[in-house]
């Protein structure tokens, strides 16, 4: 028995070394050997789950996390991995919240909820609420996570992101600056600080974040890009005239049967959603496009003048998600078609069926 345990832990060590070296198939082989020796090894199941998740095999990863929890109900890492996977890959937010609450309950069969575990669970539950558009609940929980301690850079980054979505740009900047101070190489935090500075600059506040060495939004985006170029490409920029031509072309390229129904609908270009829309209407500040007015299918039931119907495209948000001008032109067309679809009262299936998706 002692020999089997020694072999099990040796296999785990070999798997970790292979994983750190990027040799994932070798790591899986070592974990398989560990489970041959000790079939109920929670650590091995959890390790397999992490590798499979990283490889995009999320269904298999979830099975492994479930097996790890069944093998050892007090194995914290497997519980947290399972909750995060349910949030990030499956959109199972209600289940994730339930499992998070179970971890916080202090049930004897589960890990003891010390301050570090509480912080991690509050953070994950905050993310689940964020994706369900409960921004106030999300903000409350991520602040509890930061108060409990642990990965402060991560928690400040997410708190700043929630505040940004709420349109509280000044407060978001202050929190994100704390996040950058805690982890100066966190590209995600720096990028979101750039988003906030960009909005403040548009409102005439151009003092940047000198306390963390970032002069303005452009410097923040460049820094994030230097750290993680694939995830945070530099924004594409084209002049207003070229952007307007691309919008006009997108409208002109709609099927004639669609164009006939949108005569009189204005298509306008703005840099960003207004802070009033963000705060009062809960529109994401990163929204690409918006139809404002009454859907054509409901127009006969209202007294609103039809000439108030309009489609807004947010230029700088569109530029930010594209890697080159060709991709930007394509994204403009996609966004125009989606917002036209909203005017026509179409859902996503209708849009795809009509070639507007």
Image (cartoon, rainbow, N blue to C red):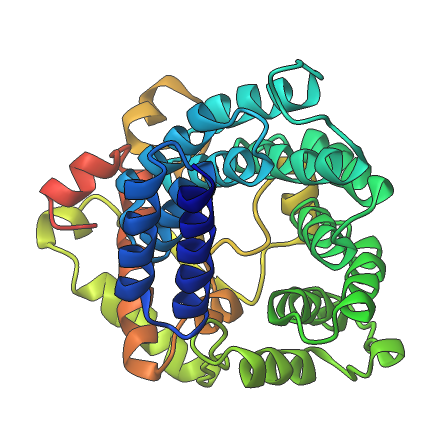
Q: In this view, does 142 lie to the left or right of 63?
A: right
Please count the marks in the image: 0
Q: Where is residue 184 in the image (x, y as percent from the top left)?
A: 74, 75
Instruction: Judge by depth and name the residue closer to the eye, 181 or 237.
Output: 181
With respect to residue 165, does 134 lie above or below? above
Please report the residue visible at 36 percent of the width from the left and 55 percent of the height from the top. 51
In which quadrant is the N terminus drawn? Answer: top left
Q: State the residue lying farthest toward the right.
A: 211
Please report the residue visible at 65 percent of the width from the left and 27 percent of the height from the top. 111
Instruction: Judge by depth and name the residue closer to the eye, 48 or 289.
Output: 48
Instruction: Judge by depth and name the residue closer to the eye, 318 or 265.
Output: 318
Q: Can residue 170 be seen?
A: yes
Instruction: Judge by depth and name the residue closer to the eye, 50 or 94.
Output: 50
With respect to residue 176, does 236 lie above or below? below
Please report the residue visible at 52 percent of the width from the left and 77 percent of the height from the top. 228
Q: Position of residue 145 (x, y in %)?
A: 77, 40
Q: Can residue 264 be seen?
A: no
**Location of residue 252 by image quarter:** bottom left
Please report the residue visible at 10 percent of the width from the left and 47 percent of the height from the top. 257
Q: Where is residue 243 in the image (x, y as percent from the top left)?
A: 39, 77
**Location of residue 105 by image quarter:** top right
Q: Position of residue 334 (x, y in %)?
A: 27, 59
């Amino acid at each position: 028995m002692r020999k089997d345990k020694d072999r099990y832990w040796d296999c785990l060590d070999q798997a970790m070394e292979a994983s750190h070296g990027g040799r994932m198939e070798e790591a899986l082989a070592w974990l398989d050997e560990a489970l041959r020796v000790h079939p109920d090894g929670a650590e091995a199941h959890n390790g397999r789950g992490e590798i499979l998740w990283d490889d995009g095999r999320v269904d298999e990863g979830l099975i492994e996390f479930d097996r790890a929890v069944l093998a050892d109900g007090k194995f914290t890492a497997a519980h947290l991995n399972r909750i995060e996977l349910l949030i990030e890959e499956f959109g199972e937010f209600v289940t994730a919240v339930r499992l998070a609450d179970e971890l916080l309950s202090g049930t004897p069969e589960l890990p003891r909820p010390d301050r570090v575990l509480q912080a991690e669970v509050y953070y994950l539950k905050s993310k689940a609420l964020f994706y369900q558009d409960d921004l106030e609940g999300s903000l409350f929980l991520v602040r509890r996570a930061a108060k409990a301690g642990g990965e402060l850079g991560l928690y400040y980054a997410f708190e700043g992101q929630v505040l940004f979505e709420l349109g509280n740009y000044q407060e978001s900047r202050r929190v994100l600056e704390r996040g950058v101070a805690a982890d100066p190489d966190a590209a995600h935090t720096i990028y979101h600080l750039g988003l906030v500075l960009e909005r403040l600059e548009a409102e005439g506040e151009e003092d940047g974040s000198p306390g963390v060495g970032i002069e303005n939004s452009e410097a923040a985006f460049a820094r994030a890009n230097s750290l993680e170029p694939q995830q945070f490409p530099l924004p594409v920029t084209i002049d207003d005239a070229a952007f307007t031509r691309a919008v006009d072309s997108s409208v002109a390229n709609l099927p004639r049967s669609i164009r006939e129904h949108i005569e009189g609908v204005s298509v306008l270009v703005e840099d960003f959603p207004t802070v009033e829309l963000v705060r009062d209407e809960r529109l994401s500040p990163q929204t690409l496009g918006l139809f404002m007015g009454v859907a054509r299918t409901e127009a006969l039931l209202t007294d609103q003048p039809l000439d108030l119907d309009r489609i807004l495209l947010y230029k700088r948000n569109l530029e930010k998600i594209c890697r080159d001008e060709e991709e930007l032109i394509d994204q403009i067309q996609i966004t125009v078609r989606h917002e036209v679809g909203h005017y026509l009262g179409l859902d996503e299936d209708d849009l795809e069926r009509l070639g507007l998706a």
